[in-house]
Image: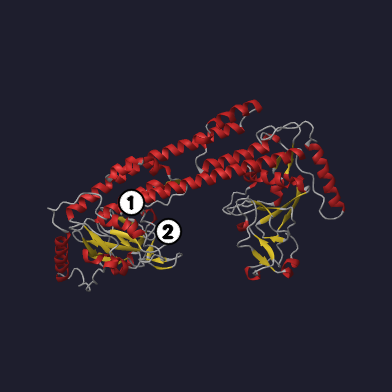
Amino acid sequence: MNTQELITAHLDLWTGAVTHKSTAGRGRNGKIELTGIKKLRELVLELAVRGKLVDQDPSEEPASVLLERIAEERARLVKEGKIKKPKKLPEIAEEDKPFELPDGWEWARMEAISEYIQRGKGPKYANSGKVRIVSQKCVQWSSFDLNASRFVDDSSLSSYQDERYIRNNDILWNSTGTGTVGRVIIVENPRYPMVADSHVTIIRLLATEPSHILNYISSPSVQQRIEPDHENSLVSGTTKQVELNSGSVKLLAVPLPPLEEQQRIVEKVDELMALCDRLEQKAGDQLEAHEVLVDTLLDALTRSADAEELSRSWARVAEHFDTLFTTEASIDKLKQTILQLAVMGRLVEQDPNDESASVLLEKIAEEKSRLVNEGKIKKEKKRLEINQADAGFDIPKNWAWVNLGELGVFVNGDRSKNYPNREDYVASGIAWINTGHIRPDGTLTRKGMHFITREKFDSLRGGKIEPTDLVYCLRGATFGKTAFVTPYEEGAIASSLMIIRPLLPIMRKYIYSYLVSPLGRSQIFRFDNGSAQPNLSANSVMMYLVPLPPANEQRRIVEKVDELMVLCNELKARLAKAGETRTHLAEAMVDQAVN
């Protein structure tokens, strides 16, 4: 089975393995990564550089003759003073050859087939000028992007020798940068005079097809070695800061086919990559159409005017459940729909025997009055009238619209001179909670929690949690994050958080469901100040519009939400397992085809 047949015979496998964060190499950038097609691209490259993509032709001039011609050309350039005489290169040991080559191929050091290999140098920058500076940001997998380029200051141009200027068919290989090191492109017909900065290596080949070398550098055989912990790593440093020095580039062993075969390989790679592009486009369009369908059907649930319409809308969703909720994104949207239906009074049936929300509000008012009389909280100012039109939907008759501030006590973090600094942290003690400790499941992390001493805790004037509290993030990119204080019964909050303490603890889980629902999240943007550092105030949060059910219905809502969230999480776990299986199958097929 040739590679093209391998692709078409297993389309479901290649297009079925999906993740939602693209890290593909030669693939297109986007929110969705088709993991199977990424593996397929890697397979094409790996077969290409191992001599398994096209047939060999024994009548073609072998690579050994090509290497002789390259050596003669290098000697001529040395004699003419155009390049320096290179040092003698070490022989390529058998352990340095990662795989066997077909007859007519040869292993060669990168320097042996190159006229010039050199990292750029740190320039004197200017915002305009005659010569552009290529940085690692310009070298993208998908393109050569000069939008990020700056210019060499004209006063320092005399320090650049002619060979430092980037030429047609030069290979640029990123040498540093987390997430950028290892990226490689070919420069074709440069429109401007350009030089590289110190983060980019220039490779200028002799009598060799540049795209074949590009494919080898892009292949897993080389890219896997752009890791500091690889046994044959090409880089130095740590995972946080790696560096590919020019010495490693010069000594890299390259599989060299006959020149005619190089050209046939490049043509076949381009043909198969174009096929991958078409598959990716088609599969991506299908995924986007799937997302639109999910959005439309779930929106219909929350827009239902009455129970009868909701029942019809749910029937449409239930009929196609197995085909609708097949991605993590669709399951997350289902979770949000469940929460929205919960706070709209559409998730469970109303019971006319329940005490109404007005009775619950009377109990809340009594508890608030008691705390005011005991001096535990201050008497609040009268709030503005509620305009329920701001919510955009009607609630059941025995519910009530309230401000969030009516349901609890709101406590800011301590802002006094005793506020803990990093040097006040201790290995164990009392939890010092910040927004980074809020987990996606609505609890606080045990791993990585910060702690302060009892003495420091006692010195704080406020921001101390109680076991029935919620914590809520007021500022930064994560504002609106919410959690129960579980598993901590004692602790204090950083100034980026606020404590929400329900006046009646039975309301705690419903309030949490409200805050993480689309309705609760939408309230944030009523009060966000819109600055570069978004933030909320406690007073703003207290003005949130809340649809309040009777106490008994709150319990039924929370129970139903918990039940459905468990089912969603189980569905997501099965989906993840199936995705892993498809990815493993794709990897196994790649290994089988290569080996």
Taking the spot 42% from the left edge, 52% from the top edge, the residue there is: 23
Taking the spot 55% from the left edge, 41% from the top edge, the residue there is: 331
- Residue 143 in view here: no
Q: Secondary structure at mark 2?
A: loop
Badge 2 density bin: few <14, some 14–19, many ≥20, Cα 10 Å: few
Q: Secondary structure at mark 1?
A: helix
- The residue identified by callout 1 is 592
Quarter in which the N terminus is drawn: top left
Q: CA distance from mark 1 to mark 2?
A: 29 Å
Asked where in the image residue 338 lies, by quadrant, the reply is top right
Residue 457 lies left or right of residue 155; in this view the side is right
Residue 235 percent coordinates (x, y): 37, 66
Please give the label number shown on residue 179: 2
Q: Nearer the viewer, residue 250 or 37?
A: 37
Residue 553 percent coordinates (x, y): 74, 38
Q: Nearer the viewer, residue 318 or 122?
A: 318
- Residue 268 in view here: yes
